[in-house]
Image (cartoon, rainbow, N blue to C red):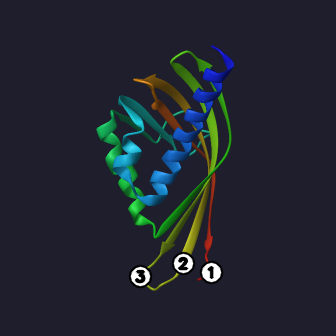
Amino acid sequence: MNPPDEAADRLAIRELVDAYARCADRRDAAGQMALFTEDTHFVVHMDATLEEPTQELHGRAALAPVFADLNTYVATTHFNGQSTVTLDGERAEGESYCLAHHLSVDEDGRRTMMVASLRYLDEFVKQDGVWRFARRRLMVDWTETRPSAA
């Protein structure tokens, strides 16, 4: 792979990872789902130390309820950090870090903030010139829930 092509692929993959977070925060489930292949595999580990996944989904359509769950929060902010990518032609693997903030307000107006430290272990595929998630493993390393100021 020549360096300009590699740089373009790396940028496109980073933009894919960022688009996922942006769609989540904007509650754009359709946009978020479009970032995945039709036969995608999405795996959630609510406790990254456990081998057994909490949830496992197959196919793009199966993602809708997962992304809809974000509607239980008043607001979210997913802040992406470092990421690594290994390219192999039309396929790639990567790991991305994210701090996800979830704001809730209960029926009495009390606000809480749940912060989750996430890692995504990804397999990407380039289809018709567009990078998509072929497999995404969401690993929750830790969470913290605390009162949130108004």
Element assignment for label 2:
strand
Furthest toward the bottom, the residue is: 108
Residue 38 horizontal/vertical position (percent) = 33, 30
How far apart are labels 1 and 2 at the CA level?
Answer: 7 Å
Q: Which mark is residue 107?
A: 3
Q: Amino acid at mark 1?
A: Ala
Residue name at image x 65 percent, y 23 percent: 4
Furthest toward the left, the residue is: 61
Residue name at image x 46 percent, y 24 percent: 126
Circle 2 sits on which residue?
Answer: 111
* Residues at discs 3 and 2 in contact (Cβ within 8 Å): no
Element assignment for label 1:
loop
Residue name at image x 52 percent, y 62 percent: 76
Q: Amino acid at mark 2?
A: Arg
Circle 1 sits on which residue?
Answer: 149
How far apart are labels 1 and 3 at the CA level?
Answer: 16 Å
